[in-house]
Image: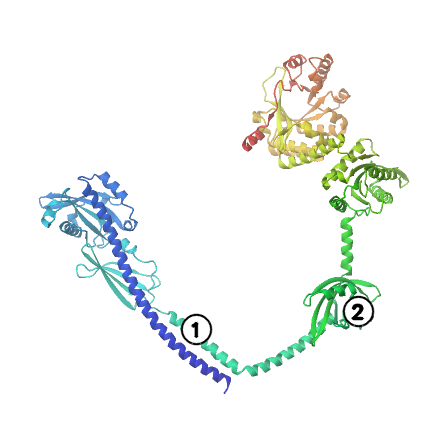
């Protein structure tokens, strides 16, 4: 019988079983849905009854207020209402709590509403006569006669403003005269003094009792059946449950306050359900069973067909593999694992390897070292190694090898795949050499030299070694006179000269520019290191360099430091640099050895440390500006303040450092242009926030160092800042010391002229400190002359100083300059300066420096 017939029979039997199970599940699902539906309807009825009970508890609690007091005022009534709002469920539907007072009139008793809460939204019931609402009055009379809670029939609440008849109801309790507990109807009718009524919105009360998403409820209706005929109170269809017709109905009655409500619910049609899932799963399993039956019956035919197909694909794959191996641009070898005989080489291997490797052994190609590693490797490990293989040209070439074991026709084989990496290896070696050597002199570069120095420092016996720091003297002269090509050639030849004077184990490197370094290995004493340094210095001094029919001699200053005197690379080079500097400072062409007790080196290291601290202060914003006022000594019109800016530095510990501690290091290491730029940019950016006078500040003086005179971009920056901040140029005074102006007269004259062309003023500071002051004075375009403080300090005791100050003042006035006396520290000095017609004075006697306002505020904020 064919396989498809067996599959069809299996499918039919399985589907019959599936239909039986699905029907049983459908009956069970309907029964469970009916049970859940009935329970949900009962739960809704119970929840509504609980809501009504809570409403009853609320009004009974309020009735106790009247039982406890003969009279209740409106204030006490309102306060009692506020205290009884804790019942949140009843409060959802509560509209008002009202008290109706009994009033006897000619036509009988009337009950008039005199107190109610809350006031908001209920003003319409003030003065309401309950007799005007029949349903309300019947519930009042019922509660009066029974002394029990009474619920009115649904009617339109006055405060709702609606005209419909069923939007609310009232719960009523009587209030009897204090001290009485009437036991009969007649006694109760005589003793009643009023009635408490709580009005509720029917829809809100019922809605709060309904579940949000019932399982089986399709719709629900609440009816009042107290009078026999059903009167609808509330209805709701639940979302997602009314798509089909309701299949069942259930009703539950509840009684409260003398009235009967009925909850009528309809259940949703339980379309779908778990029986459909059983049907679908059973159908799927039936199909799977049919497929499995067909598969089992037809296994033999399919197995034969599959085997034939795989054999054909394997044969085609083997052919493609062989062709691919022949076309690969890398070497492929197969060798027997037992004796290493090579049995296959691809085209690239036949062309690249030596001809005699066709029948050779694998060890003849790879060498014994690789074979040892191959034998030690695990059987499943892919071994990767670089090795030199014999080439077809008789030489060797480098290849990157990958070796692994495979099995062919039951025989274990070595499979070797290799790629030629000769060019990459040569390129790597070339790049490695370039990364560690100077391209000009072929010596080690600074990076490699420092690495080797660090290696020596890491050795336990680093004491037997020294570092020589070599700096060529006046090398710039050769560059300036004969060009940089001549300078480069000189460095190349000097490198060869120095290499000849060193031992094979010593390390020579070019550290940059005209600086070289030597690491002496095995130099046990300072004397041995000094001898080697002198040998180098003598060879450099005796070398004669020829270039384009010119000859030059050169010398070098050498700093020597023993490795034992340093623990870090930075410390080692700092000591060597300091020693080399002192060799230059001592006259050049000499050797200086670092010693820990050398005061000169200590001073040099201190300046180097200050240079680093200044850079950090510039980076961290720890430079400060103080101002000192200049006071006029001669009568004249009132004007704004004149100040000079003074530089300070806040240390890492927060202490303020005076300029004398760090400015010498800044000048020596070329940091003054950076500092000057910071002062100029900071001062001009905050000019109106320096002094309390603000924008009325007359002039602000800024000092410029000698290094800034040759800063081509400084003038352009000043011009840009003046325009950016809208500064009147005449408010700015730039001070240049006499010493700087005389030493670099051309640059000073040019900068002064450009500043004055902007409208700025220029002052010559420390005038008189130089020896040629008067000769240069007439050649400089100035606005102000500041007499050196050394003359002013001696005014009271030295008649020569008085004469000099007087002469400078007269000459300055003849030139049309404003004359200022600095360092005025006593009133006695002021008394001498005034008759001399000095224009302004500056010093502690007049004003002590203060922090600039914009930084002062920042300091207070940081504090």
* Residue at screen point 76% across, 28% down: 744
Q: Is residue 20 visible?
A: yes
Vertical relation: 297 (above or below) 402: below
The scheme the figure's colours follow is rainbow
Vertical relation: 59 (above or below) 294: above
Label 2: how many residues lie within 10 Å, few (<14), some (14-19) or many (20+)?
few
* Residue at screen point 25% across, 41% down: 78
Residue 159 percent coordinates (x, y) = 24, 47
Q: Quadrant of the C terminus?
A: top right
Label 1: how many residues lie within 10 Å, few (<14), some (14-19) or many (20+)?
some
Q: Which residue occupies the foreground of this view, 388 or 548?
A: 388
Label drawn at residue 215 = none
In this figure, what is the number of numbered marks? 2
Secondary structure at badge 2 equals helix
Q: Quadrant of residue 754?
A: top right
Locate residue 12 relative to residue 730 in the image: left or right.
Answer: left
Is disc 2 in contact with disc 1, using a CB cutoff of under 8 Å? no
* Residue at screen point 34% across, 66% down: 243
Residue 671 percent coordinates (x, y) = 70, 34
Locate residue 220 relative to residue 632 in the image: left or right.
Answer: left
Q: Which residue ends up furthest to the right in the rendered image?
A: 549
Using the numbered discs, state the Cα–Cα distance from disc 2 to disc 1 in whole angstroms: 66 Å
Residue 61 percent coordinates (x, y) = 23, 46
Secondary structure at badge 1 equals helix
Q: Which residue is mark 2?
A: 351
Q: Which numbered disc flags the more N-terminal residue, 2 or 1?
A: 1
Label drawn at residue 281 = 1
Q: Is residue 161 visible?
A: no
């Amino acid at each position: 019988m064919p396989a498809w017939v067996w599959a069809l029979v299996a499918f039919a039997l399985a589907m019959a079983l599936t239909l039986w199970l699905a029907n049983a599940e459908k009956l069970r699902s309907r029964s469970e849905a009916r049970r859940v539906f009935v329970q949900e309807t009962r739960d809704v009825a119970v929840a509504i009854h609980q809501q009504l009970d809570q409403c009853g508890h609320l009004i009974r609690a309020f009735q106790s207020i009247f039982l406890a007091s003969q009279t209740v005022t409106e204030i006490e009534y309102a306060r009692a209402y506020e205290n009884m709002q804790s019942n949140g469920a009843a409060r959802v539907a509560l509209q008002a709590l009202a008290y109706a007072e009994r009033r006897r009139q000619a036509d009988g008793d009337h009950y008039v509403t005199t107190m109610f809460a809350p006031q908001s939204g209920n003003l319409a019931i003030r003065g309401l006569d309950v007799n005007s609402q029949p349903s309300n009055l019947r519930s009042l009379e019922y509660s009066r006669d029974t002394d029990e809670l009474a619920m009115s029939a649904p009617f339109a609440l006055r405060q709702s403003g609606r005209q419909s008849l069923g939007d609310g109801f009232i719960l009523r309790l009587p209030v009897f005269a204090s001290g009485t507990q009437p036991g009969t109807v007649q006694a109760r009718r005589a003793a009643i003094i009023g009635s408490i009524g709580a009005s509720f919105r029917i829809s809100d009360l019922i809605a709060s009792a309904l579940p949000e998403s019932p399982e089986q409820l399709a719709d629900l209706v609440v009816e009042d059946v107290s009078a026999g005929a059903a009167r609808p109170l509330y209805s709701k269809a639940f979302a997602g449950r009314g798509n089909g017709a309701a299949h069942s109905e259930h009703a539950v009655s509840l009684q409260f306050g003398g009235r009967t409500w009925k909850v009528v619910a309809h259940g949703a049609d339980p379309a779908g359900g778990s029986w459909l899932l059983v049907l679908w799963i059973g159908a799927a399993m039936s199909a799977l069973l049919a497929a499995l039956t067909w598969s089992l019956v037809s296994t033999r035919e399919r197995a034969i067909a599959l085997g034939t197909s795989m054999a054909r694909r394997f044969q085609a794959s083997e052919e493609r593999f062989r062709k691919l191996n022949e076309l690969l641009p890398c070497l492929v070898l197969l060798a027997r694992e037992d004796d290493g005989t090579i049995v296959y080489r691809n085209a690239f291997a036949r062309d690249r390897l030596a001809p005699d490797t066709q029948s050779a052994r694998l060890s003849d190609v790879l060498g014994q070292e690789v074979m040892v590693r191959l034998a030690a490797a695990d059987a499943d490990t892919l071994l990767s190694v670089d090795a030199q293989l014999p080439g077809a040209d008789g030489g060797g070439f480098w290849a990157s090898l990958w070796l692994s074991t495979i099995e062919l026709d039951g025989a274990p084989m070595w499979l070797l795949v290799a790629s030629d990496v000769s060019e990459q290896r040569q390129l790597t070696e070339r790049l490695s050499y370039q990364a560690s050597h100077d391209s000009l002199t072929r010596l080690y570069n600074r990076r490699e030299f420092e690495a080797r120095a660090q290696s020596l420092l890491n050795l336990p016996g680093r004491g037997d070694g020294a570092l020589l720091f070599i700096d060529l003297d006046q090398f710039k002269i050769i560059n300036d006179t004969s060009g940089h090509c001549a300078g480069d050639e000189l460095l190349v030849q000097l490198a060869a000269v120095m290499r000849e004077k060193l031992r094979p184990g010593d390390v020579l490197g070019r550290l940059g520019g005209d600086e070289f370094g030597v690491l002496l290995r095995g130099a046990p004493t300072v004397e041995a290191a000094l001898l080697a340094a002198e040998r180098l210095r003598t060879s450099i001094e005796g070398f004669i360099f020829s270039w384009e029919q010119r000859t030059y001699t050169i010398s070098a200053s050498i700093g020597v430091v023993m490795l034992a005197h340093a623990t870090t690379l930075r410390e080692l080079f700092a000591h060597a640099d300091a020693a080399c500097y002192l060799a230059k400072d001592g006259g050049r062409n000499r050797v200086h050895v670092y010693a820990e007790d050398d005061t000169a080196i200590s001073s040099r290291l201190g300046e180097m440390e200050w240079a680093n601290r200044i850079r950090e202060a510039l980076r961290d914003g720890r430079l400060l500006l103080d101002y000192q006022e200049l006071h006029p000594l001669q009568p004249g019109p009132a004007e704004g303040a004149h100040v000079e800016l003074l530089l300070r530095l806040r240390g890492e510990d927060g202490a303020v450092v005076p300029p004398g501690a760090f400015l010498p290091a800044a000048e020596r290491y070329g940091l003054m242009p950076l500092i000057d730029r910071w002062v100029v940019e900071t001062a001009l950016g905050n000019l109106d926030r320096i002094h309390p006078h603000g924008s009325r500040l007359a002039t602000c003086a800024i000092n410029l160092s000698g290094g800034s005179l040759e800063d081509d971009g400084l003038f352009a920056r000043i011009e840009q800042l003046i325009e950016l901040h809208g500064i009147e140029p005449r408010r700015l005074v730039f001070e240049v010391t006499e010493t700087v102006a005389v030493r670099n007269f051309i640059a000073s004259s040019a900068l002064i002229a450009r500043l004055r062309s902007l409208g700025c003023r220029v002052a010559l500071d420390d005038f008189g400190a130089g020896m040629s002051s008067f000769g240069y004075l007439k050649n400089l375009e100035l606005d102000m002359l500041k007499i050196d403080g050394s003359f002013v300090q001696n005014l009271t005791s030295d008649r020569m100083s008085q004469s000099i100050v007087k002469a400078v003042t007269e000459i300055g006035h003849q030139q049309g300059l404003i004359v200022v006396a600095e360092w005025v520290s006593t009133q006695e000095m002021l008394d001498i300066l005034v008759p001399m017609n000095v224009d302004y004075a500056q010093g502690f006697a007049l004003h002590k420096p203060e922090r600039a306002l914009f930084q002062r505020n920042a300091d207070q904020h940081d504090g």
